[in-house]
Amino acid sequence: MGLSTHVLDTMHGSPAAGMQVSLFTTRGEVASLVKSFTLNSDGRNPDGLLYDHDSLRQGTYRLVFDVAGYFAAKGVSLPEPNFLNRVSLDFGVAHEDQHYHVPLLVSPWSYSTYRGS
């Protein structure tokens, strides 16, 4: 239970190790930073869950992924301006007793997400 994320680099077919990610709580247009972290070698938060079962609350959240910074660090030649700079995912948690997993599949030109398990 809780909240987690996982990022896969679809250009290289690997986890997005080293990508910078920030988690926010949101209330309307106001976003409050909860934490920022760098994805580990498996493309996950090195500290595990973003919120554990006891800490996750009903509400709205935002994950921001530094896509351009990640691909630039990998040596990918990107146009200026980049097609994707940061990917921001706004999502809601309706059930505190369920696990919310927010995966991101990303390349310099596309991304997709879904509610995982």
Image: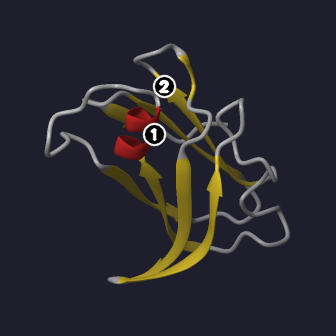
Instruction: Between label 2 and label 1, give the one nearer the viewer.
Output: 1
Image quadrant in which you'd find residue 25: bottom right
Residue found at x 38% / y 36%: 72
Rendered-image quadrant of the C terminus: top right
Mark 1: which secondary structure?
helix
Disc 2 secondary structure class: strand
Left or right of 35: which side holds 85? left
For label 1, the crowd category at 10 Å Cα-Cα, with few meaning under 14, some 14 to 19 and many 20 or more, is many
- Choose top left, top right, bottom left or bottom right for residue 116: top right
Residue indicated by mark 1:
70
Q: Is residue 111 visible?
A: yes
Looking at the image, the residue that sits furthest to the right is 54
Task: Read off the residue under disc 2.
Answer: 9
Pointer 2 and pointer 1: residues touching (CB < 8 Å)?
yes
Residue drawn where x is 14% and y is 42% of the image: 80
Amino acid carrying label 2: it is: Asp
Outermost residue, top direction?
13
The structure residue drawn at horizontal position 80% and vertical position 50%, both measured from the top left corner, is 48
Q: Amino acid at mark 1?
A: Tyr
24 sits left or right of 37 in the view: left
Rendered image: mark on residue 83: none
Residue at horizontal 30 percent and vertical 31 percent from the top = 108
| Residue 112 x %, y % | 38, 34
